[in-house]
Image (cartoon, helix red, strand yellow):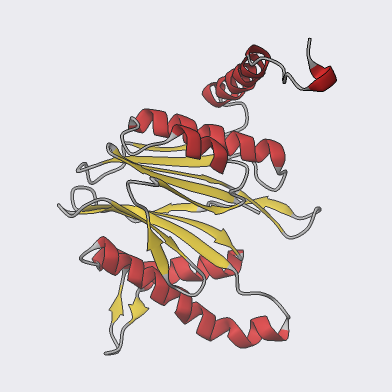
Amino acid sequence: MTYCVGLLVEGGLVMIADTRTNAGLDDISTYRKLHHFNVPGERVMMLASAGNLSVTQSVLSLLAEGVEDDEGGRLRLVETETMFQAAQLVGRAIRRVRSIERQGFEAANLRFEVSFLFGGQIGSDPMRLFLIYSAGNFIECSGDAPFLQIGEHKYGKPILDRAVRFDTDISDALKVGLISMDSTMRSNLGVGLPIDIAVARRGALDLDVSRRIEVGDIYFHDLRERWSAALRAAHKAIPRPPYGGLKG
């Protein structure tokens, strides 16, 4: 299991991904799920993955080396002209891997499961964020719902729904995103540290933050403790339900 979240606010883009993968309770490993395709001053692009690890690694390799087009050429992700074209290329890479691996997956009775969060900015074009599905199709983040999630998203979504708007400060967006990650980790052991984070401000065309949060990180530990204390204080401050014998 995994959890990745992308938040596209007025100030820019925040991407957060855990690193835990498992093939059973006794086979747990750490793999990077948040990847960068950047040319500073020209483009900044971030890709977070969830699903079958062999599929995501194959898709990432194709995007780096080039995906075949209809004319026999190859196009790399860093060569695309717009973010929409780049999202289409990610979808094409997924379909290419599916066509190559289909027989093996069917023979092993395995499901082809993969999804990506893809966001960034190219030149003076708008910053954009997409959720790309295993069929290669995608949806785009909007100002009305300024975040997208993949993986084990149900535990972190209520926090984002209540706390994130398009005009949320980008530093606060990162903070709330980390709280949603902590909530997911507390409810699902399949999601865990280390966590990779990346932040890009609109127009900067480079990463402002690229960091891995390891076990023992002082800020993340403090965030977890403060959030837990705030929840306890909030529920104590709310009056008890005035129903039947519960009054008093």
Please say if 194 is above or below 239. Answer: below
Indicate the quadrant where residue 45 lies.
bottom left
Q: In screen coordinates, is 172 left or right of 112? A: left
Please say if 118 is above or below 198. Answer: below
Using the image as rendered, state which of residue 185 and residue 63 is in the foreground: 185
Q: In screen coordinates, is 103 left or right of 16? A: right
**Residue 186 at what x, y percent from top left?**
69, 36
**Residue 151 at what x, y percent from top left?**
59, 54
Instruction: Give the residue drawn at x 27%, y 61%.
Output: 83
Residue lying furthest left in this view? 124
Please say if 62 is above or below 180. Answer: below
Instruction: Give the residue drawn at x 42%, y 36%.
Output: 164
Instruction: Give the residue drawn at x 31%, y 70%.
Output: 76
Using the image as rendered, state which of residue 61 and residue 221 is in the foreground: 221
- Visible residue check, residue 45: no
Q: How many marks?
A: 0
Of the 4 image quadrants, the one containing the N terminus is bottom right
- Visible residue check, residue 183: yes
Of the 4 image quadrants, the one containing the C terminus is top right
**Residue 26 at what x, y percent from top left?**
81, 53
Using the image as rendered, state which of residue 44 and residue 13 is in the foreground: 13
Indicate the quadrant where residue 50 lies.
bottom right
